[in-house]
Image (cartoon, rainbow, N blue to C red):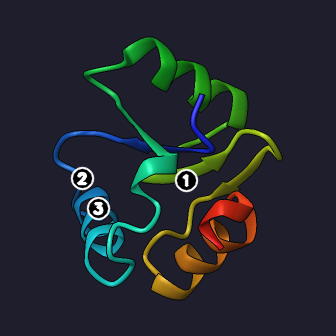
Amino acid sequence: MSEFLMLTQDDCHECERLKQMLARPLKGRYDAVIEVVHRTDHPETFTEQVERYHLRKTPVLIHPASGDVLTDTASLGAVGAFLKSRASAALG
């Protein structure tokens, strides 16, 4: 399992915004440690995570090792801080 899971689905403007944030301002730095769990492509895993963390919206970033969840993915500062503080030492 990856260090982070990103739950996403079709017709989700916030999901697209987060993907762009990860690609542009964060320059793909965390791509190697984020597993994208799309509702349609991985329905069992998606449902399992939604139930485990009692989620009601997408996108969501999850750090399974700590059980931490970030639902406020609209803020670049919040996303960057969440990923940086929980990413492996190899990413800095």
Residue 52 x %, y %:
71, 27
Check disc 1 and give the amino acid type: Leu
Quadrant that contains the N terminus: top right
Graded by Cα atoms within 10 Å as few (under 14), some (14 to 19) or many (20 or more), the crowding at tag 3 reads: some
Check disc 3 and give the amino acid type: Lys
The reply, left or right, for residue 53 in relation to residue 25 is right
C-beta proximity under 8 Å, tags 1 and 2: no
Q: Residue furthest right?
A: 66
Question: Which residue position is annotated with label 1?
Answer: 61
- Name the mark on residue 49: none
Cα separation between marks 2 and 3: 11 Å
The reply, left or right, for residue 36 in relation to residue 67 is left
57 vs 76: above or below:
above
30 vs 77: above or below:
above
Residue 80 x %, y %:
55, 78
Question: Which residue position is annotated with label 3?
Answer: 19
The reply, left or right, for residue 30 in relation to residue 82 is left
